[in-house]
Amino acid sequence: MFVKKAYRVKELNIAQDLLESLIDYCRQNNITDIYLGTVDILKAACRFYERNAFVKIDMQELPSYFPRMKADNTFYHLNLNVPSL
């Protein structure tokens, strides 16, 4: 997911709202696992995912159907069956 830089201000909460919408959709549709890829130089993105209970995983742990982008070198997983913090 990408949010235009001008809209990444905390007051708008766009990234958080988008992520929460995705998680709600997954829960409503019995999707239990969310995987994502990013690049390690996007430190704020990595912190955002970790703050939202995503766990960093090795590329080898991705499911075979995961559509990996060439630039991605950091991967995260969120299991929705695990209670939230």
Image (spheres, rainbow, N blue to C red):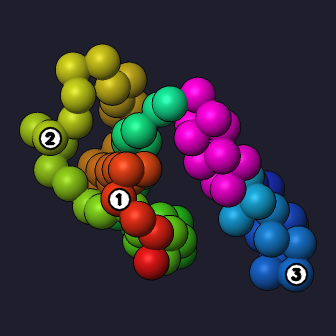
Q: Nearer the viewer, mark 3 or mark 1?
A: 1
Label 3 crowd bin: few (<14), some (14–19), many (20+), radius 10 Å:
few
Q: Quickly name the residue at label 3.
A: 11
> Residue 68 in the image: x percent, y percent?
34, 29
Q: Quickly name the residue at label 1.
A: 82
Q: Which residues are magenta?
A: 19-29
Label 1 crowd bin: few (<14), some (14–19), many (20+), radius 10 Å:
few
Instruction: State how far apart marks 1 and 2 are (Cα).
Output: 18 Å
Q: Residue type at mark 2? A: Glu
> Residue 44 in the image: x percent, y percent?
53, 74
Q: Residue at x 85, y 65 (%)?
A: 7
Compared with 22, 44 (above or below) is: below
Q: Earlier in the sequence, mark 3 or mark 2?
A: 3
| Magenta stretch: helix, strand or loop mostly | helix
Q: Residue type at mark 3? A: Glu
Describe the element under mark 3 as helix, strand or loop: loop
The reply to whether residue 2 is in sight is no
In reply to whether residue 25 is colored magenta, the answer given is: yes
Q: Quickly name the residue at label 2.
A: 61
In the depicted view, which residue is nearer to us: 58 or 34?
A: 34
